[in-house]
Image: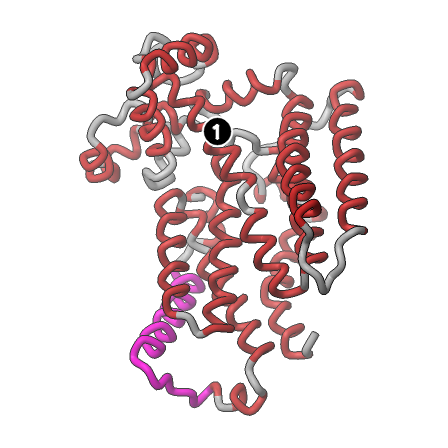
Amino acid sequence: MPKATRWFLLIPAIPTTIYVLNLLFYPNRDLLILWRREFNVPLDAILPLILCVLSYAICGWLLVRRVKSDDGLTRAQRAGLIALAIVGGLAIQWSVTRVTEPDPLVGIVWRTYAIKSSGYWTVGAQVQDVARFIGDYPQNAPEYPVHESRHPPGLSLIYWAGAQLFKLAPEAANTVANWLRPYSCLSDVATTVAANQMAAGAFGILVEILLAMLPVLPLYALVKRLAGAKAAVLAVLLYPLTPGYGIWVAQLDRGFALATITVLLLCEAIVTRNSYKHALAAGFVLSIATFASFGNVPIALIAGIYALVRIIQTQPRANLRRLSTWQPRRRKERLSFLEQCRCGCWLSCSLAWTRSHCTG
């Protein structure tokens, strides 16, 4: 790794290290987290999780051993990776949820409808006029549950979409709704709400789990381009073992990783291919992500740091020495450069980092 790259890696490494050290040793570290959590569960509740992770790790290790760094995956290896990512990912999510919920499926449903843990269904499933809902959102947001009052309307609209789909299949809506009604009592909506609106909760659960598992696709493509097929397989297999993947089942925040990795993959194409269409695609993905949550705004900063490191790695040193006096030749490059500078200044100076969790 070039020496200059190591210096730029310190940009995210230093604040991350400081934050972790504060969590470990700062006397008032409870101010850095949203709530305290006590871990006190019996062994029989955590044993399935241990067995699941061990089985997953063994299968993953056997698969990685058969992959060569310089070669692509064979059809059998690709099928095995997909199967392991899907089955193993679902098993990990299920076993992690079972640690605190005797019936994981019921626990996931409760989290979907409960106002304190989510609440997006409470707002989104009842939307009738999307244009009016979005237009009136700023003045209505303070009256919404805690999460909706701090987020843009994007996540709530997932349940609106589910309600519209189930409206087209009333029989399926009745079947799903009758099963879910007993578990929706933690919301602010009556359990006798229309069947398509009640069934929209099941649609939201499926979308949430799908969004949480999809990041492995851009992750594989990005790591394969940077480090080869074997490293890409390893990255895909390690992703389901990250804490946020299993702990926050039914929390739509898990899907934000999809936007982050997708933007980084597009940034790689922008730097290495000088691709304008990939720049537009990155902006589109970032727009959708910030429409879902203001907590996704720092993705722009992450992408900027990544692009800068990759420019240093890929550009000749003679070009880098002229970076301070560099003038883009084409108008679109000039505008792109100025926009990156503007976003960087805004993120550095205008975002209230100490209260970012309140809007995320």
Find residue 310 and report its horizontal and vertical position in percent. 56, 72
The residue that appears at 48% across and 27% down in the rendered structure is 205
Q: Is residue 148 magenta?
A: no
The residue labelled by disc 1 is 206
**In what quadrant of the picture does the C terminus appear?**
top left
**In what quadrant of the picture does the N terminus appear?**
bottom right
Position of 185 compared to 60: left or right? left
The residue that appears at 53% across and 43% down in the rendered structure is 214
- Vertical position of residue 3 compared to residue 289: above or below: below
* Circle 1: element type: helix
Q: Which residues are magenta?
A: 324-350
Q: Residues within 10 Å of mark 1 (few under 14, many from 20)?
A: few
The residue that appears at 39% across and 72% down in the rendered structure is 341
Find residue 176 and report its horizontal and vertical position in percent. 43, 14
- Vertical position of residue 40 compared to residue 181: above or below: below
Find residue 320 and report its horizontal and vertical position in percent. 53, 86
Find residue 302 and report its horizontal and vertical position in percent. 51, 61
- Secondary structure, magenta segment, majority class: helix
Q: Is residue 340 at all visible to an observer of this figure? A: yes
The quarter holding residue 15 reads bottom right
Q: Is residue 243 at all visible to an observer of this figure? A: no
Q: Amino acid at mark 1?
A: Leu
The residue that appears at 50% across and 23% down in the rendered structure is 111
Position of 310 compared to 287: left or right? right
The quarter holding residue 317 reads bottom right
